[in-house]
Amino acid sequence: GTTNCYQAVEAAWQHCLANGKDLYFPSGIYRITSENNFPFGRINGLPPTSLLDCKNITIFGDGPTTILRTDTINGGDVIQLNGAKNLHIRNLYLTATISGSGAGSNGVSITGGYDNITLDHIWCENLPSLDKTTYVDGGKALTIQTPVSGQTVVCGTLKATNIFAKGCVYGFGFEINLVAASTMDTSVDVDIVAEDCREAVIVSAGAATGAIPANWSMGVRVKAQAINCMTDVTLGRAHGVDVECQVITTKTRAQRILNYAGVKWFAADTVAKVVGLLAAYAHNCNVTITGNKGECASIAQIGGTSTGSSGLSASSLNSRFELGLRGTSVSGDIVEIDFGGNVANSCTFICYGSGSPSAAFYLPSRNNTIVFGNLHTLKDLSVQGAVKFTYTDGVNSYGEINYDDEAVTFRQTLGSSASLRVIKVLNNSGSTVFAMRNDGYLSTAGRLTASAVATVKGVLPIYDEANAFYGYVPVYTSYTP
């Protein structure tokens, strides 16, 4: 932990790579300086034209007691994999320091393409970041920042399990070029615990510079636990992402916008950014977020953002949001992000314990399905089979609506008494004004008394229960009350 061990680590890595050997770091502090990263899985230049085959080497340590640390002036990611494949890293603690203002440092940074990468039991803590006015640089525990425009190398499979991020800008981030990524078959699977982070999970991209397939999936699945984070899940121009997040909160809103040094992560951060879910343009995504957010601006903010040249809707679209997150919101519980009228279309909201969704999500033109407590808003519902109605026991059916290959049918199943009514029509005050009985007779409040009638205007044909003609009921032009 005192000398710069870059040359020794580089020699060990090159030996293992040449001979197909695993590389073991016993307990201790391994320090690298001079603006370098630990030299694993790197091809110089960005983007690479091919992937470096690391021969399924495993780089491993003894867990949190094996510490890999970069001490640099202007930022050095601890592990930066640039164009690597067939590499496995586990049981390491990663941290860094910086003394200049050039850049921050990440824990594990994936750039330039990847395939068959696994990470397991990686601890990242207090990674340094810099406020660059419009963004925060560095400080990320696990970040994937590929592909770039024009990249042709593979972005394949990456599986990360037991990732622990504490005091980081974000726990896991997937930040890509939409057009380049949409041509690749990517599989990213992450299991992470993020504590005291600015954001636990973020999947985002800039506005597209070209067309994007409508049903494309980024191939990202994340299971996260977020503890005292400012924002728990952020989706910005996310396609086909699956996120499950449990939220735990013991700190105030004001405490959660501060980093491990007690200052704001980002000068522009305010308590208005303490939000459980921020989803701006989530297409074909599946999001489940539960737990307790405590004091917050909102439980969830969902809606649209600019699309660039993607050719797709600027709204969140065809996504499912399951919101079981409790909290005390000061700016509404589940609120819309309205980008020029683009909010959320054809989405499903399942809300329990999260407060009420904004009225903007209920507009019929937005075609959303909303379940909030015992209230259900369904659009263009198709039912196969009977719709049955229970009463006090919640089990036994006393009436049903069905279809018998000819027409919609109404049936009461309470009993066979002739006086029991099959259908009732109620007025505004809840009183019965019309009904049809079991025996086919009608009961109605729409009756007039008459002592005399005059002139038959016409007749109303009546058919029997077998739909055979039975006779006529006369209709008179006048009557005497």
Image: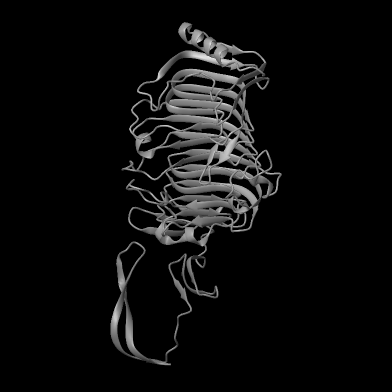
Task: Give the vertical position of 295 relative to 469 (above or below).
Answer: above
Q: Quadrant of residue 147?
A: top left
Classify 277 as above or below 337.
Answer: above
Residue 192 seen anywhere in this rendered image of the structure = yes
| Position of the N terminus by quadrant | top right
| Residue 447 left/right relative to 247 | left
Most foreground residue, 453 or 381: 381
Residue 325 spot, x, y in % from top left: 61, 47
Front residue of this view, candidates 74 and 172: 74
Residue 370 versus residue 1: which sits nearer the camera? Answer: 1
- Specify the quadrant of the image occupied by residue 180: top left
Quarter of the picture holding the C terminus: bottom left
Q: Residue at x 62, y 39 (%)?
A: 197
Answer left or right for 475 relative to 91: left
| Colouring mode (rainbow / by chain / secondary structure / one colour) | one colour
Residue 398 at least partly seen: no
**Residue 372: x and y, percent?**
56, 55
Q: Pick the residue in front: 313 or 127.
A: 127
Percent of width and height locating residue 230: 61, 45
Residue 159's x, y, as percent? 50, 26
Q: How many marks?
A: 0
Spot the residue most to the top.
19
Q: Is residue 261 above or below residue 111?
A: below
